[in-house]
Image (cartoon, rainbow, N blue to C red):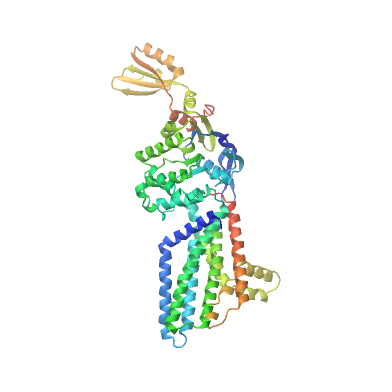
């Protein structure tokens, strides 16, 4: 990473950390983990299942909310407030700005996920008083959640590079929701014929396959995550977010900053 | 080598959603700014000043034409490292302190880490923000923000500084401070290109000015040269309490004060006015040529009634 990208990323991270909303969300996520413990205590025999399910779902949802609501303002806010002008008048390329912003927010989300992940493990330890080998798969689930964040952040950034924050939020959140049901979209495509099949298949490939990155339920039931799935999901998430990031750079490169 | 060379820079926006209509923000502009000059880019609001600056900064792409800055293209990193820019009504990252902001911009400008901190302290002291260096920008006043804005523009010791309305929104003290800073930069041999609609500042600071109105260059040159090209006006003062109709007919601006009347009119009407006073047996007290100010020239170029585009352009 070059020094300019690192500097922009560090500043984005600092902005997120100094943003009170972010702190509130972390606190709220920790409260959710606390609630999971409470539910675990009244769910005899399935405490771990409930804790992992609730904890990881909270980690995922709060991360997505942060990714979308900070991501959509990454570019548009800088244009509205004209802070971008002084940055781009320096020896900084437009693509470096976009990439720096992306790394800054994903860095924030990774740190955030780490904090919340620690909370989930603490809750797990609280309900079972020891760690089992299968609990290690929770780490895989957390890793997949981070991969989801890469995709959502790139989408929010992409929409932010040409659209208003409100529309960007709607678009990014819609794609997240559709992506969460992408397996169903693929199933629908398999059942149709002709143009419909072609359109449904195209849609299934265009929307992010978030459902493939959601292994929360499997991990909660003690299921193992195969290594090839880790590799495949990593490759998919990196490729998808890179493509969206390229699209964001392409749009931003030709945009007049009025 | 010119510091700035603008060759037919033009910007046409397509406005409207369905049926897009062209809207010309800047007609082809040709302009040259020499190294070491303080150049004022004057025009009323919406004249095209900010559009021009944004095109020079590479923030807005021109429809046609080009510009060379310090002999190179604006997209060249080496060129950008040598320029500083203060946008109009600047807003900076308000979660940063003054020192953190300058640190951020210093790094982006490629300033070496050795001595950067000292340079930042020096710059904060220079703009009078040494005491507020560790205060978050959200607690800064408008004048303080403008000063930190100027600090970020000159922190990396650029050869050429672009300032968009640097005195806008400042109180007289703040304006004076910014003016002093600009004079200091001028003494250091920097080229300054600044846009403003505050003519007194331009008159006091600029070696040359350009006047732009409705996206069109209306005049460019040294202030004295431009005002000298104005058609001369004279001021007549005589004893009396009324203005003869024949003098009013000469389109004179008349002001009656006590027992004297003051009239300002075109130099070409001077003899006719004196003849009227003689005929009316009114006693002439004085006849003085009126020196045209930059404001007079500016107004002659931008007022709708005035079509005298040929003056000085």
Q: Position of residue B160 (x, y in %)?
A: 51, 39
Q: Left or right: B180 with respect to A226?
A: left
Total numbered circles: 0
Residue at image point 53% right, 34% down: B35
Above or below residue B186? Residue A144 is: below
* Most distant residue in the right direction: A194
Q: Nearer the viewer, residue B172 or A188?
A: B172
Instruction: Tell me which residue sits at (40%, 18%) in the image.
Output: B246
Residue situated furthest bottom in the rendering: A45
Above or below residue B231? Residue A163 is below
Q: Residue B64 occupies which quadrant of the picture?
A: top right
Q: Looking at the picture, how far across and down is residue A151, in whole percent?
A: 56, 66
- Identify the residue shown where x is 46% and y is 36%: B188
**Residue B268, relative to residue B103: is it above or below?**
above
Q: Based on the displayed image, in which of its 4 quarters is residue A115 positioned?
A: bottom left
Whole-percent x and y of residue A100? 53, 57
Answer yes or no: is residue B87 visible: no
Of residues A253 and B144, the one drawn nearer to the viewer in this rendering: B144
Query: Does A138 appear above or below A105?
Result: below
| Residue A47 visible in the picture | yes
Q: Nearer the viewer, residue A89 or A3?
A: A3
From the top left corner, tell me how far across and down residue B113 is, in percent. 48, 51
Which residue is found at the position 41% from the left and 51% from the top?
Answer: B99
Please indicate whether residue B139 sits to the left or right of residue B87 in the image: left
């Amino acid at each position: 990473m070059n020094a300019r990208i690192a500097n922009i990323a560090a500043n984005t991270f600092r902005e997120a950390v100094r943003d009170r909303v972010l702190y509130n969300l972390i606190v709220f996520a920790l409260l959710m983990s606390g609630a999971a413990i409470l539910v675990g205590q009244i769910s005899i025999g399935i405490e771990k299942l409930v804790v992992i399910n609730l904890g990881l779902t909270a980690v995922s949802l709060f991360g997505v909310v942060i990714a979308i609501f900070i991501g959509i303002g990454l570019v548009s806010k800088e244009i509205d407030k004209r802070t971008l002008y002084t940055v781009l008048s320096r020896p900084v390329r437009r693509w470096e700005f976009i990439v720096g912003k992306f790394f800054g927010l994903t860095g924030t989300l990774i740190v955030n996920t780490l904090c919340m992940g620690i909370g989930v493990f603490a809750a797990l330890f609280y309900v079972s008083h020891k760690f089992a080998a299968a609990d290690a798969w929770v780490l895989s689930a957390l890793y997949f959640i981070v991969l989801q964040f890469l995709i959502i952040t790139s989408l929010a950034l992409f929409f932010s590079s040409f659209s208003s924050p409100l529309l960007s939020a709607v678009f990014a959140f819609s794609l997240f929701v559709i992506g969460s049901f992408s397996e169903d979209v693929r199933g629908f495509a398999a059942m149709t014929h002709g143009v419909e099949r072609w359109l449904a298949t195209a849609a299934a490939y265009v929307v992010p396959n978030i459902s493939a990155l959601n292994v929360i339920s499997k991990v909660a039931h003690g299921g193992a995550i195969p290594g090839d799935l880790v590799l495949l999901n990593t490759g998919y998430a990196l490729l998808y977010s890179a493509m969206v990031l390229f699209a964001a750079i392409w749009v931003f490169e030709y945009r007049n900053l009025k | 080598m010119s510091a700035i060379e603008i060759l037919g820079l033009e910007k046409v926006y397509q406005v409207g959603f369905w049926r897009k209509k062209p809207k010309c923000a800047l007609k082809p502009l040709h302009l040259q700014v020499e190294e070491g000059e303080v150049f004022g880019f004057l025009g009323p609001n919406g004249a095209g000043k900010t559009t021009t600056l944004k095109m020079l900064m590479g923030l807005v792409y021109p429809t046609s034409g080009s510009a060379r800055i310090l002999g190179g293209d604006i997209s060249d990193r080496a060129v950008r490292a040598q320029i500083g820019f203060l946008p109009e009504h600047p807003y900076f990252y308000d979660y940063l302190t003054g020192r953190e902001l300058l640190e951020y911009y210093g790094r982006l400008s490629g300033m070496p880490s050795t001595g950067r901190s000292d340079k930042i302290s020096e710059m904060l002291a220079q703009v009078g923000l040494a005491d507020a260096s560790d205060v978050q920008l959200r607690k800064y006043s408008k004048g303080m923000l403008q000063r930190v804005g100027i600090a970020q523009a000159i922190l990396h010791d650029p050869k050429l500084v672009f300032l968009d309305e640097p005195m806008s929104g400042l109180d007289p003290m703040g304006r004076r401070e910014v003016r002093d800073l600009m004079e200091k930069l001028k003494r250091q041999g920097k080229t300054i290109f600044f846009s403003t609609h505050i003519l007194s500042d331009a008159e006091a600071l600029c070696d040359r000015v350009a006047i732009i109105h409705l996206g069109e260059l209306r005049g460019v040159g040294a202030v004295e040269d431009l005002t000298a090209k104005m058609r001369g006006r004279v001021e007549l003062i005589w004893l009396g309490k009324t203005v003869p109709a024949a003098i009013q007919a000469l389109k004179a601006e008349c002001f009656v004060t006590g027992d004297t009347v003051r009239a300002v009119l075109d130099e070409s009407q001077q003899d006719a006015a004196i003849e009227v006073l003689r005929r009316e047996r009114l006693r002439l007290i004085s006849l003085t040529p009126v020196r045209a100010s930059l404001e007079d020239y500016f107004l002659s170029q931008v007022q709708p009634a005035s079509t005298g585009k040929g003056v000085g352009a």
